[in-house]
Image (tube, grey):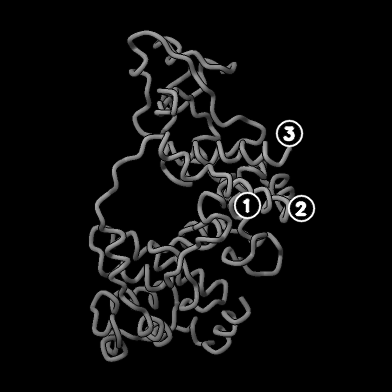
Amino acid sequence: MQVMRGWATRNAPWVGLVSILGTAQDALAGDYEGSPQVAEFVGEMTRDYGFAGEQLMGVFREAERKQAILDAISKPAERVKQWNEYRPMFITDARIARGVDFWRQHEAVLARAEQEYGVPAQVIVSIIGVETFFGRNTGNYRVIDALSTLGFDYPPRAEFFRKELREFLLLAREEQVDPLTLKGSYAGAMGLPQFMPSSFRAYAVDFDGDGHINIWTNPDDAIGSVASYFKRHGWVAGEPVVSRADVRGEQVDAGLTTGIEPTKTVGELRALGWSSHDALRDDMSVTAFRLEGDNGPEYWMGLTNFYAITRYNRSVMYAMAVHQLSEQLVQARGVK
């Protein structure tokens, strides 16, 4: 990130406060030349966060509207996959082998993250594996282009992406990096763990102690940041993630949770014909769900740590993929 930091030296007035409202349209060029939305946004950033308007205008002069991003976010949703189709997308021999290599390569850092945050190494490795195949697929769009395009040219979620654009500019200033150089997904997710800018500022950590947080090319910071995220979202050290259930009777499906929130208790499920494979307290809140497996329906109870995984991506199947990949990594590595 040294090249990026050189930008901060060249643009020392970045943090200064100047008035831009009267000159905004003259200053802008390129795809966002004369945009009232951009002028208003820059005005807010100077007024509320002390940005130097001239430098910020320079950033937006270079920002590009990407039709490919609008096409990607607007395309019709694919048919919802069943678990027996979804699981093979993430739990593959290649991903497991690369995960074992990643674990061995960063074993000391993963062990420290597990000790400090209570999140098992295999779960951290699994997240990075599911998100980016251990850094292979981190995204090729400039984050400034992605968030500008979606913040100013995608009305259905413009407010959300303008908030993320604000967070991105703040993190670039805090980390002294050039906002024009950072890349990510078409939606602005960044680095090995695919953090959105707001998650970066809230949960990312400088795990190697070099004074900067770099989740793009520094696996140490990426590992620590994933562990930090899970700890902050309720991960409980030493607790299980899910429990398989046997079911019988006509009221079984009445126990299924609507959404991912853990709104059912084990006792309530037992009364509806659910029987956990593990000893669980009757008053324990769980997420009760059914998956279509290769051998028919599977019934599961998601526990506290399962819910923590869904806070990373609000999908039951995503959380199960992360969990089962982590189990496969342990098995392949030969660690108990």
Which residue is painted at 58% across and 44% down in the image? Answer: 93
User: Secondary structure under badge 3?
Assistant: loop
Q: Disc number at residue 108? A: 2
Tell me where residue 170 appears, x and y as whole percent.
Answer: 48, 70
Amino acid at circle 3:
Lys
Measured in 3D between alpha carbons, the distance from the residue under mark 3 to the one under mark 2, in whole angstroms, is 17 Å
Point out the residue furthest to the right here.
Answer: 108
Tell me where residue 16 appears, x and y as whole percent.
Answer: 47, 84
Measured in 3D between alpha carbons, the distance from the residue under mark 1 to the one under mark 3, in whole angstroms, is 19 Å
Tell which of 97 and 205 is nearer to you: 97
Horizontal relation, residue 194 to residue 80: left or right: right
Badge 1: residue crowd in 10 Å (few <14, some 14–19, many ≥20): some
Q: Disc number at residue 336? A: 3
Q: Nearer the viewer, mark 1 or mark 2?
A: 1
Amino acid at circle 1:
Arg
User: Of label 1 and label 3, which has the lower sequence position?
Assistant: 1
Which residue is painted at 26% across and 84% down in the image? Answer: 33
Badge 3: residue crowd in 10 Å (few <14, some 14–19, many ≥20): few
Horizontal relation, residue 80 to residue 233: left or right: left
Disc 1, disc 3: CB below 8 Å?
Answer: no
Quarter containing the C terminus: top right
Amino acid at circle 2:
Ala
Mark 1, residue position: 98
